[in-house]
Image: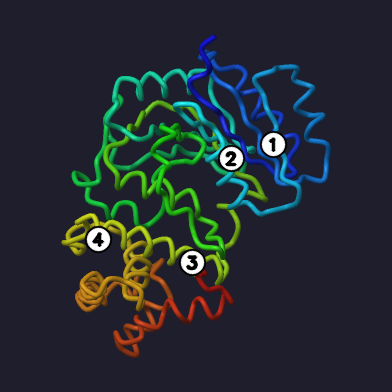
């Protein structure tokens, strides 16, 4: 008997009602050739009982013997499947019934693309639609960073995690993050996949993205959070530079709002940046000191506009010290 084409991975921790709803949305898919892997990070309730209640043999449960943290739990969820495709679903999000069939059909038709993403509708404490902003067509389209420029990935993740369906082989050789665990892990991963070639964007909504008080992306940005964010910007930019991208940073960033431009400049003027990339970022600062007076401009950018551009080299370091966080690689 032919096995399933795709494994749906749902990393989870202590959100039984959300997990139950997420599983319901998967089992309502109009594409039947899947199995589900729930990877539980040692939740303090009986996850096995919840899974067994569905009575569906396609749902498998893997439980961590102890709490290993979100990053490691996610890594194991993604690396365990052996199916051709892996679909990701956060335990607090929902799929619409057509999501999986449209994703697999698109990936089968576009063998050059490493992953698929679609528009996501926010619900809960926020509303709106999320999708890559450069995708303006009303039809399925493929995107490549050499056409859009890679800087579009630097202000933040352009795809919603629960919308991603990828080829399992695309994960080979991925840099999963540092041992001190950046919380923006999905941005780090999908941004690397985008550097490997084309990916598919579907403008039609296939995912419902839940906003709530314990949502990671709704938490207030702490000093540590800012340090981890800057680390992710720099890591993606460093890899893009090695691949031949970001050679005209000023042109690629000319339409960025003050918040995005100032954050990227701070990240890329840090000591770990490739020297040529740091020089470009410093030149952007010198030509765009005016944004220091704009709403949303980063505090360290404003400070550099007063004391001098030399401060930019230490701005990221000061953020790490304030957040008591340092990237520990390996």
Residue 218, image x, y percentages = 58, 53
Q: Are marks 4 and 2 in contact (CB under 8 Å)?
A: no
Determine the secondary structure under disc 2.
helix
What's the residue at 61%, 23% (across, down)?
A: 25
Which label was assigned to residue 241? 4
Q: Which residue is mark 3?
A: 329
Q: Is residue 161 above or below residue 242?
A: above
What's the residue at 29%, 26% (across, down)?
A: 111
Q: Which residue is mark 2?
A: 77
Lower sequence index among marks 2 and 3: 2
Tell how many labels: 4
Q: Are marks 1 and 2 in contact (CB under 8 Å)?
A: yes
Residue closer to the observer: 85 or 161:
85
Per the model, the C-alpha gap separating discs 4 and 2 is 30 Å
Lower sequence index among marks 1 and 2: 1
Q: Are marks 4 and 1 in contact (CB under 8 Å)?
A: no
Q: Nearer the viewer, mark 4 or mark 3?
A: 3
Q: Is residue 213 above or below residue 93?
A: below
Lower sequence index among marks 4 and 3: 4
Report whether 306 appears left or right of 244: right
Rate crowding at label 1 as few (under 14), some (14 to 19) or many (20 or more) other CA atoms within 10 Å: some
Which label was assigned to residue 62? 1
Residue closer to the observer: 37 or 157:
37
Rate crowding at label 2 as few (under 14), some (14 to 19) or many (20 or more) other CA atoms within 10 Å: many
Q: Quadrant of the N terminus?
A: top right
């Amino acid at each position: 008997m032919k096995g399933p084409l795709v494994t749906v991975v749902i990393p989870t921790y202590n959100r039984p009602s959300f997990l139950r709803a997420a599983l319901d949305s998967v089992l309502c898919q109009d594409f039947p050739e899947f199995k589900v892997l729930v990877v539980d990070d040692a939740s303090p309730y009986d996850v096995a009982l919840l899974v067994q209640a569905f009575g569906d043999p396609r749902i498998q449960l893997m439980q961590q013997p102890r709490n290993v943290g979100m990053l490691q739990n996610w890594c194991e969820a993604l690396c365990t499947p052996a199916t051709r495709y892996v679909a990701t679903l956060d335990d607090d999000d929902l799929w619409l019934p057509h999501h999986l069939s449209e994703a697999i059909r698109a990936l089968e038709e576009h063998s050059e693309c490493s992953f698929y993403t679609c528009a996501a509708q926010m619900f809960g404490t926020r509303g709106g639609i999320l999708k890559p902003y450069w995708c303006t067509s009303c039809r399925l389209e493929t995107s490549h960073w050499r056409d859009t420029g890679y800087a579009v990935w630097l202000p933040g993740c352009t795809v919603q995690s629960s919308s991603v369906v990828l080829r399992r082989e695309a994960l080979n050789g991925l840099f999963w993050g540092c041992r001190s665990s950046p919380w923006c892990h999905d941005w780090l991963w999908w941004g690397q996949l985008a550097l490997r070639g084309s990916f598919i964007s579907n403008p039609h909504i296939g995912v419902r993205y839940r906003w709530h008080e314990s949502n990671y992306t709704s938490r207030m940005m702490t000093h540590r959070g800012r340090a981890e964010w800057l680390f992710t910007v720099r890591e993606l930019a460093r890899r893009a530079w090695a691949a031949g991208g970001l050679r005209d940073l000023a042109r690629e960033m000319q339409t960025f709002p003050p918040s995005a431009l100032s954050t990227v400049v701070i990240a890329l003027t840090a000591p770990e940046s490739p020297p040529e990339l740091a020089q470009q970022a410093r030149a952007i600062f010198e030509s765009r000191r005016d944004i220091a007076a704009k709403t949303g401009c980063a505090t360290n950018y404003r400070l550099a506009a007063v004391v001098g551009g030399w401060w930019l080299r230490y701005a990221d370091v000061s953020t790490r010290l304030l957040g008591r966080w340092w990237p520990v690689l390996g």
